[in-house]
Image (cartoon, rainbow, N blue to C red):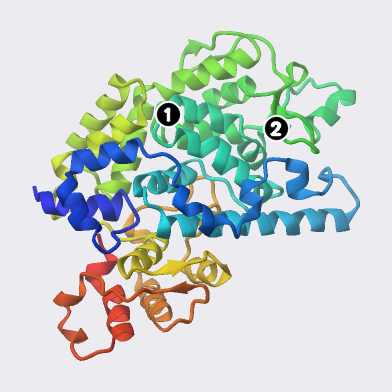
C-alpha cells in the first residue's frame, strides 16, 4: 500500500485531477481530514461567476424556463413541437456546459465526481422529448441535495423526478382498465408501461443478477402506475389514484404494504436497503474509484458497511477510498473522455467557459453528461474507451487544447507532473511539452 499514491488518487479519482499545489496541500492535511472536509463541503460559491453564463440553471419556474406550451404526442402543430425541441436542446447544452465548468473549476472535487457518478447511474437522455429542458431541475433539486446522503432519499427523489418520469415513460403508465374519458390524465393512451420498473430493478437498485424475474418487473410496474405529472404545462410529480392499479402486489416473494402512493414509497425503501442493492452499488463505485475488476474482499466490506449504516453514501465511499486496495499500484484506471479533458485543464492551471467548442471536443470522444443513449449510462471499464481510433482522438484533444483550437478553453502555464518522466519533451516549447504530456500513457491513466 502506497499512501502517497492514495493522496494522488484521491485527487485524480475522487476528484477530476489535481491543480498545482493540491497534492502537497492534501499531504499536509491527510487523507481522512481531506475526506471529512469533502463530505462537509457546502455549495462552492466560487463557481457562481463562472456559471453566470448558463442562466437556465438558475430558473425555478418551468413556464419561464421553456416559455412554451408543451404539445401532446398527438398534436398536429409541428412548429410547436420544433420550438419545444429547440429550446430543450438549448437548455441541455447549458446543463452539460456547466458540468464541464464545475469539473474543471470546482474546489470540492468529490461532490463533482459524485454528481457525475449519480447522473450516470440514474441516467436520463437529454435529447429525448422534453427531458433536456428538465435537466436543470433534475440536477439542482433531485441529484445535488442527496449526493453524499442516504441512498434511500436519492432513490425516492429520482423516482418522483419529472426527468425520470418522462425519460422512462412512467408518466404515461396506468391501469389497463383506465376509462377512455380519463386518458387525458395519462398524457397518452394509457396502459401499463414496464420501462421504469425494469430499470429500477436492473440498474438503479438490485443489479442484473439481483434475483428478480419478469413477474417482479410486472408487479413493480403495477406498483408505480399512477406516478405521473401534474400536467404538460406544469410537469411536477403527482400521484393520481385514478390511474393506479389497485389490489395486492408481491415483489421478490413479499407483499408490498400500503395502498396507492404508499406502495411505491415502501417498495423504494425496501429496495434501497436490500443486500443485492448494497452489492450492486459497492461494485459500481469500486469500479469507478478502484479498478475495472474490483477485488471481492473490498466489495464485501463496502457492501456490509453500506447496510450497517442504513444506506449512507458517505460511509460507502469512506470504506472504498480508505481501503488498502485503493492505494494498490497495480490497480490503474483509464480516464474517460470527460475526466481526461477536465484533468488536462486542471493539471496545467487552465480555464474553460464550458462552451460549444469544448462540448464538441469531448463529445467526439463519446462522453457528454446527460447524453448517454441508454438508461445504463456510459460504461466505466477502460476496454470501452481504449482502441486505436480512440487513442488518436485522445492525443488530438491534448494537442487541440495546447494549440488554442478549443475556443473558450485554454491550458495554463504549468506543466503536468508527468513531464519529467518524458525524455521526448526535452527542448520543446511550453505548449508542445504540455500536449505531449497530456497524450502520454502516464497522464491517460490514474
State the count of labels: 2
* Residue closer to the observer: 39 or 245: 39
Looking at the rendered structure, which numbered label has been put on residue 236? 2
Q: Look at 68% across and 59% down and name the residue there.
A: 90
Horizontal and vertical percent for residue 21?
A: 23, 61
Looking at the rendered structure, which numbered label has been put on residue 16? none
Pointer 1 and pointer 2: residues touching (CB < 8 Å)? no
Q: Earlier in the sequence, mark 1 or mark 2?
A: 1
Where disc 1 sits, the SS reads: helix
| Image quadrant containing the C terminus | bottom left
* Label 2 Cα crowd, 10 Å radius (few <14 / some 14-19 / many 20+): some
Up the image or down, 43 lies above or below 392; here it is above
Q: Look at 59% across and 41% down and name the residue there.
A: 138
Q: Is residue 35 left or right of residue 164?
A: left
Horizontal and vertical percent for residue 443?
A: 26, 68
* Label 1 Cα crowd, 10 Å radius (few <14 / some 14-19 / many 20+): many
* Residue closer to the observer: 47 or 134: 47
Residue 435: tell me if it is visible: yes
Q: Is residue 96 left or right of residue 65?
A: left
* Residue, disc 1: 151
* Residue closer to the observer: 340 or 410: 410
Horizontal and vertical percent for residue 43?
A: 45, 42
Amino acid at each position: 500500500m502506497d499512501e502517497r499514491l492514495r493522496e494522488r488518487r484521491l485527487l485524480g479519482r475522487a476528484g477530476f485531477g489535481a491543480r498545482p499545489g493540491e497534492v502537497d496541500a492534501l499531504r499536509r492535511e491527510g487523507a481522512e481530514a481531506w475526506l471529512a472536509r469533502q463530505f462537509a463541503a457546502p455549495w462552492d460559491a466560487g463557481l457562481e461567476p463562472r456559471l453566470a453564463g448558463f442562466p437556465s440553471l438558475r430558473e425555478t419556474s418551468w413556464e419561464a424556463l421553456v416559455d412554451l406550451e408543451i404539445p401532446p404526442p398527438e398534436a398536429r402543430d409541428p412548429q410547436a413541437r420544433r420550438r419545444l425541441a429547440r429550446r430543450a436542446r438549448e437548455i441541455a447544452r447549458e446543463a452539460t456546459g456547466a458540468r464541464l465548468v464545475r469539473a474543471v473549476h470546482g474546489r470540492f472535487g468529490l461532490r463533482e465526481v459524485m454528481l457525475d457518478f449519480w447522473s450516470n447511474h440514474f441516467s436520463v437522455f437529454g435529447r429525448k422529448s422534453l427531458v433536456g429542458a428538465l435537466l436543470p431541475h433534475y440536477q439542482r433539486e433531485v441529484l445535488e441535495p442527496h449526493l453524499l446522503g442516504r441512498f434511500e432519499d436519492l432513490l425516492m427523489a429520482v423516482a418522483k423526478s419529472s426527468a425520470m418520469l418522462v425519460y422512462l415513460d412512467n408518466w404515461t403508465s396506468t391501469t389497463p382498465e383506465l376509462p377512455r374519458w380519463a386518458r387525458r390524465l395519462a398524457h397518452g393512451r394509457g396502459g401499463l408501461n414496464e420501462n421504469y420498473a425494469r430499470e429500477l430493478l436492473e440498474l438503479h437498485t438490485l443489479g442484473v443478477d439481483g434475483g428478480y424475474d419478469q413477474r417482479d418487473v410486472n408487479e413493480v410496474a403495477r406498483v408505480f402506475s399512477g406516478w405521473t405529472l401534474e400536467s404538460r404545462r406544469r410537469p411536477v410529480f403527482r400521484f393520481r389514484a385514478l390511474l393506479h392499479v389497485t389490489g395486492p402486489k408481491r415483489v421478490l416473494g413479499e407483499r408490498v404494504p400500503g395502498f396507492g402512493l404508499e406502495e411505491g414509497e415502501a417498495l423504494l425503501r425496501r429496495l434501497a436497503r436490500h443486500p443485492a442493492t448494497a452489492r450492486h452499488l459497492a461494485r459500481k463505485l469500486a469500479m469507478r474509484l478502484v479498478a475495472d475488476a474490483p477485488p471481492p474482499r473490498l466489495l464485501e466490506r463496502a457492501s456490509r458497511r453500506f447496510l450497517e449504516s442504513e444506506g449512507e453514501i458517505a460511509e460507502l465511499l469512506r470504506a472504498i477510498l480508505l481501503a488498502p486496495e485503493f492505494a494498490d499500484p497495480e490497480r490503474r484506471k483509464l480516464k474517460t473522455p470527460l475526466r481526461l479533458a477536465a484533468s488536462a485543464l486542471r493539471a496545467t492551471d487552465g480555464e474553460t467557459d464550458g462552451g460549444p467548442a469544448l462540448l464538441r471536443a469531448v463529445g467526439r470522444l463519446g462522453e457528454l453528461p446527460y447524453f448517454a443513449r441508454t438508461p445504463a449510462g456510459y460504461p466505466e471499464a477502460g476496454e470501452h474507451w481504449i482502441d486505436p481510433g480512440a487513442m488518436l482522438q485522445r492525443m488530438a484533444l491534448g494537442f487541440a487544447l495546447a494549440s488554442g483550437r478549443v475556443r473558450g478553453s485554454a491550458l495554463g502555464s504549468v506543466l503536468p507532473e508527468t513531464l519529467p518522466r518524458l525524455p521526448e519533451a526535452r527542448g520543446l516549447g511550453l505548449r508542445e511539452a504540455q500536449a505531449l504530456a497530456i497524450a502520454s500513457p502516464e497522464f491517460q491513466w490514474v
